Image (tube, rainbow, N blue to C red):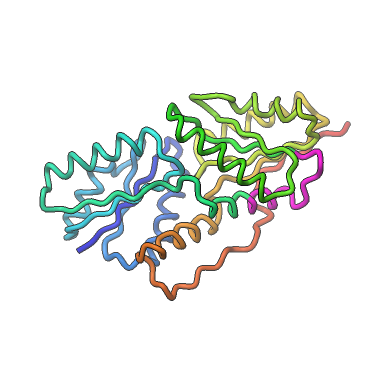
């Protein structure tokens, strides 16, 4: 019997963990695989080893780990492979497979454009978009975000598309905002390149409010994160349909734009 084990990052914010579980439930509903479970890397249980044990107790002979992650960084290159190796030593009769993260996928551009249009349907010539990632010590993960940003610029009418990171590496979020200002932007739209809510989203909201207070003539808007509606579910279903894990006759339709799915901080004019 086969199992799919979704692997999420985990968060200190319960709402973020609940969002991940809702997401994996929606994807699981369409899978042909009989056993579907979810685990976390940190901050929440079950962890990977516990998730594997649950699958085995349910009769799994083959377990495919499916990371719900954007890029291949430390967790993908070290933590998850190490957990699989430990499980393989304990359960030599179990077959393990390991899927790749989302990576640089053109399908994510559709979600980014939805996020932009939700807060600014018609970007002006003085609009800058700032795509903000988590930040990593892994240069591949950091450079992948720049490639996403370039591809996004190629497919939109936005004059400036900049990149920043919230931690670990540079340029940081505040530096990204200042760069947009220096370029001459009168409107800055922040697109968080994060899957779910969490501590970083809440900090970004506060940082943007502080920046807005210092620059009252600049219109600042921040979209919601990538997994805030059904579009990310559809992205994963399309991916898994290509791998034969979702019925071929399942019709997957992108959801319409959700104009309410945004945090917007309007400029003060006087």
Residue 119, horizontal then vertical, whole percent = 71, 48
Q: Residue at x 50, y 33 (%)?
A: 142
- With 199 as the anchor, is 185 left or right in this view? right
Residue 54, horizontal then vertical, whole percent = 21, 52
- Residue 131: name its quadrant: top right
- Residue 184: name its quadrant: top right
Which of the pair 4/54 is nearer the observer? Answer: 4
Q: Is residue 77 above or below residue 7?
A: above
Q: Residue at x 65, y 34 (%)?
A: 162
Residue 106, horizontal then vertical, whole percent = 54, 52
Q: Is residue 209 magenta?
A: no
Residue 117, horizontal then vertical, whole percent = 70, 52
- With 35 as the anchor, is 264 left or right in this view? right
Which of the pair 239/252 is nearer the observer? Answer: 239
The tally of labels here is 0
Quarter of the figure that contains the N terminus: bottom left
Q: Residue at x 23, y 61 (%)?
A: 2
Which of the pair 67/15 is nearer the observer? Answer: 67
Residue projecting furthest to the bottom: 249
Quarter of the figure that contains the C terminus: top right
Residue projecting furthest to the right: 270
Magenta region, residue range: 113-127
Q: Is residue 167 above or below residue 67?
A: above
Q: Is residue 122 magenta?
A: yes
- Residue 50: name its quadrant: top left
């Amino acid at each position: 019997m086969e199992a799919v084990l979704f692997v999420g990052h985990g968060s200190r914010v319960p709402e973020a963990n609940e969002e991940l579980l809702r997401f994996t439930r929606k994807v699981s509903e369409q899978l042909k695989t009989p056993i579907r479970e979810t685990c976390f890397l940190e901050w929440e249980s079950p962890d990977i080893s516990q998730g594997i044990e649950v699958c085995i107790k349910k009769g799994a002979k083959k377990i495919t780990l499916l990371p719900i992650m954007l890029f291949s960084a430390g967790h993908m290159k070290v933590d998850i492979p190490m957990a699989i190796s430990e499980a393989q030593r304990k359960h030599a009769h179990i077959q393990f497979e390991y899927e790749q993260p989302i990576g640089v996928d053109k399908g994510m551009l559709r979600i980014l454009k939805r996020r932009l249009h939700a807060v600014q349907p018609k970007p002006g010539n003085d609009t800058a978009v700032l795509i903000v990632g988590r930040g990593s010590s892994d240069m591949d993960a950091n450079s992948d975000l720049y490639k996403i940003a370039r591809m996004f610029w190629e497919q939109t009418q936005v004059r400036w598309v900049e990149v920043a990171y919230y931690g670990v590496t540079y340029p940081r979020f505040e530096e990204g905002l200042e760069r947009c200002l220096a370029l001459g932007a009168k409107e800055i739209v922040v697109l968080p390149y994060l899957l779910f809510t969490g501590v970083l989203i809440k900090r970004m909201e506060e940082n943007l409010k502080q920046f807005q207070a210092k620059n009252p003539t600049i219109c600042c808007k921040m979209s919601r994160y990538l997994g805030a509606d059904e579009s990310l579910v559809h992205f994963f279903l399309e991916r898994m349909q290509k791998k034969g894990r979702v019925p071929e006759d399942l019709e997957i339709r992108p959801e319409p734009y959700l104009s309410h799915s945004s945090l917007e901080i309007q400029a003060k004019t006087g």
